[in-house]
Image (cartoon, coloured by chain):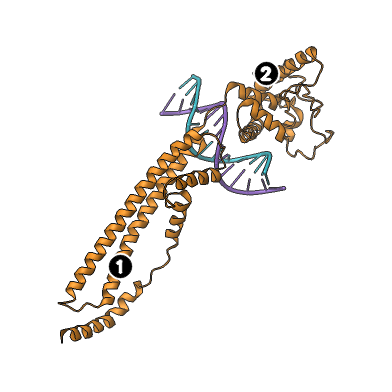
Chain colours: A orange, B purple, C cyan
DNA sequence: AACCATGATTACGC
DNA sequence: GCGTAATCATGGTT
């Protein structure tokens, strides 16, 4: 008697409540959650356990950053921090899952128990479970979000080289400057030259490229400021070249920087005082000052298409 | 602390 | 992919 009555009442409840609750019945895919999942997976936080996970994370980080393969010390530090995040994430996740299961079973038992004294349909229980799961998954999403944030912060801390900037050694800067000022009319080192510079200066090729990029732009922006430096290096290379030519009349093959063929640029440097020349001094560096090196492939005027100097005999 | 120098990154163009 | 220009973030200096 009672079961039959209850089932009827349940049916009525279903019908009245249907319109209200049907809306939240199906759950949307939630693109943000997917995004978070993907990121955590890519970061190696959510992936397979240990070892492979961390390695994958580091490789992903390095590949995306395009960093140099060295600096493994920082990476190991990064790795430990990342695995810390991983463990926290996993324990939290597990905790939530467990809590969710416990709560769900608890509620289910409760409802089942209550179904003896009041009309509770199985569907209602099901729906309740769904609600609980949704609530917990919302919490999980939050956990994922904060984990993602933590990883991002970690990455920006450790992998962003700007934060770990060290000035190059004196010799390195010297070598770079030497090349720059001795090729002032066309300060674009070839791949080979970059390689040589990198090797001799103890830095990477991309660092050489960065350096030249920065140097060109900063030089061009404020030639006056670099006048003194230019003179010093021009003098230096000139002296080096003369010494070398006295010593042995061969083309230098060591760093490729030697030789004084500053054609239009270095001839008057010796007479320019370090301080006053700033304003009117853009003169003596000729081509590159007004032309600003612009296009390397189409020389504006009488320059022959073959590179810049007489020295590069390779 | 303010300031400049400097290496690295980003956005964009070719 | 390499270049410029702008920008960021840190290292040194004052």
Residue A231 image label: none
Left or right, A170 with respect to A30, comes to right
Specify the quadrant of the image occupied by residue A221: top right
- A42 up-or-down from A171: above or below: below
Q: Is residue A153 visible?
A: yes
Which secondary structure, mark 1?
A: helix
Q: Name the side, left or right, on which B5 lies relative to A283.
A: left
Q: Which residue is mark 2?
A: A232
Most foreground residue, A229 or A312 = A312
Q: Residue at x 43, y 42 (%)?
A: A154
Residue A36 placement (x, y as % from top left): 43, 55
Residue A187 image offset from top left, x and y in percent = 71, 31
1 or 2: mark nearer the eye: 1
Mark 1 to mark 2 CA distance (whole Å): 76 Å
In terms of image quadrants, where is residue A247? top right
The disc label shown at residue A131, or none? 1
**In the visual, does A205 lie left or right of A9?**
right
Can residue A189 be seen from the camera position used here? no
Q: Quadrant of the N terminus of chain A?
A: bottom left
Q: Chain of mark 1?
A: A
Q: Is residue A173 above or below residue A306?
A: above
């Amino acid at each position: 008697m009672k079961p039959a009555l209850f089932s009827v009442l349940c049916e009525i409840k279903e019908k009245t409540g249907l319109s209200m609750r049907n809306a939240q019945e199906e759950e949307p895919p939630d693109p943000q959650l997917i995004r978070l999942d993907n990121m955590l997976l890519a970061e190696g936080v959510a992936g397979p356990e240990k070892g492979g996970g961390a390695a994958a994370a580091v490789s992903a980080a390095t590949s995306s950053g395009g960093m140099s393969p060295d600096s493994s010390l920082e990476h190991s530090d990064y790795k430990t921090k990342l695995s810390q995040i991983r463990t926290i994430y996993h324990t939290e996740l597990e905790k939530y899952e467990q809590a969710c299961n416990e709560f769900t079973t608890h509620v289910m038992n409760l409802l089942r128990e209550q179904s003896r004294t009041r009309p509770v349909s199985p569907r209602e229980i099901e729906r309740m479970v769904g609600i609980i799961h949704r609530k917990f998954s919302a919490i999980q999403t939050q956990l994922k979000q904060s984990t993602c944030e933590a990883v991002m912060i970690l990455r920006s801390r450790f992998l962003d080289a700007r934060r770990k900037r060290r000035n190059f050694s004196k010799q390195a800067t010297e070598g770079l400057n030497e090349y720059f000022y001795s090729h002032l009319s066309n300060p674009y080192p070839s791949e080979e030259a970059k390689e040589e510079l990198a090797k001799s200066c103890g830095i990477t090729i991309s660092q050489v490229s960065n350096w030249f990029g920065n140097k060109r732009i900063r030089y061009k922006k404020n030639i006056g400021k670099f006048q003194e430096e230019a003179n010093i290096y021009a003098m230096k290379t000139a002296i080096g070249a003369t010494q070398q030519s006295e010593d042995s009349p061969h083309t230098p093959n060591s760093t490729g920087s030697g030789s004084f063929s500053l054609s239009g640029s270095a001839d008057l440097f010796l007479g320019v005082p370090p301080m006053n020349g700033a304003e009117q001094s853009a003169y003596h560096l000729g081509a590159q000052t007004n032309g600003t090196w612009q296009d390397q492939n189409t020389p504006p005027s009488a320059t022959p298409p073959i590179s810049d100097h007489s020295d590069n005999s390779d």
